Amino acid sequence: MLFFPYKLDIALYRIPFLTILVCLVCIATFASQVRSSAAFDRNLQTFCSTDTDANLRAILDSIDDETLGKGCASIFTGLRQSQDRDQKIVELAKQVHGLDFYRDRVQDLRYKEDALRGGLADFESFVPKELTDELAYRPDRYNVVTMVTSTFAHGSLDHLLGNLVFFYIFASCVESALGVLNFAFAFLLMAVVTSLAYSHSVAAADALPAIGLSGVAMGMMAMLTTMLPRARIWCFFWFLLIFRRFTLPVLVIAAWHIGWNIYELNHHDAASHINYIAHVSGAATGVALGVLYRLFAPQQLDQLAMGMES
């Protein structure tokens, strides 16, 4: 069975240039992520298999850390992302047992620490960071730049396409109503609010980095629904030999998606890796902006409403 909304029954009175640009940037970014990931894997394998000396390999093989795991790839990748590298290296050196290079305990620990520091320096010079890691928002760091860049990065082709379909359907109409500058402000505000909501909803130090446009897409859906609650959306349904194309009120689509995300926010399995708090906070931001726009700029909404298909 297949069911998805694909088009609002609103004729746009201006081309949504910024919405189209966001979609193109997301596509280009994902292509760069794929290339970056392939280069990372190649260099990582080369470094860990041939570019580490025997003593460092022995040290790495003796470590099995609770947070970083074990093995060259896991340990150095984790150290690169650690906020306190020196402290973590000291902890790792103490975990090495049954492998003594010096009789003096202090000298032996210092040697292991230096070996790990040197290995990390070589790792960082030989293995480039993945683009996804550079763009992702880490909830314990409150980086405004990555709050925005993370919206353009995606974890898979399905993730990308699903977000772009929903984003374009709603954002194109929002941009048509708001204009480029107001739309850009709404986009950036949603990106920042959803990131902050994520930071305040998790044990930030242990939480996964966030990527994806879904929080902003939910915000655009909620904002359009608030501004134009009478709009309808075209949907496609397929099941076996049954094909249907019909319209539903945008309120129904929004209520379903927002309601489902609120439910999942309170009942979801943490292993799902879906950022429900970003979805819900994005929707809340969209509703707030939609209310403000209805109060202070109703004439643009009236003009857009005239473009609804009968």
Image: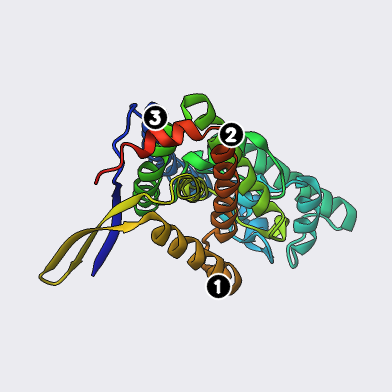
Task: Tell me the quarter of the picture where residue 136 sits.
Answer: top right
For marks 1 and 2, give the CA distance. 41 Å
**Dot 3: element:** helix
Residue 155 position, x and y percent, is 44, 51
Q: Quarter of the image containing the N terminus?
A: bottom left
Disc number placed over residue 269 in the picture, else none: 1
**Dot 1: element:** loop
Identify the residue shown where x is 47% and y is 42%.
153
Report whether 113 appears left or right of 280.
right
Identify the residue shown where x is 56% and y is 66%.
262
**Dot 2: element:** helix
Label 2 Cα neighbours within 10 Å, binned few <14 / some 14-19 / many ≥20: few
Identify the residue shown where x is 76% and y is 63%.
95
Report whether 100 appears left or right of 222.
right
Residue that label 3 marks:
21
Work out whether residue 51 or residue 146 is closer to the camera in this orientation and state it.
Answer: 146
Residue 82 position, x and y percent, is 70, 48
Kindly report which numbered mark, 1 or 2, lies closer to the viewer in this rendering: 2
Residue 217 position, x and y percent, is 46, 47
Observer able to see residue 29: no
Work out whether residue 106 or residue 219 is closer to the camera in this orientation and state it.
Answer: 219
The kind of residue on which mark 2 rests is: Phe
Work out whether residue 124 or residue 200 is closer to the camera in this orientation and state it.
Answer: 200
Residue that label 2 marks:
296
Q: Which of marks 2 and 3 is nearer the N terminus?
A: 3
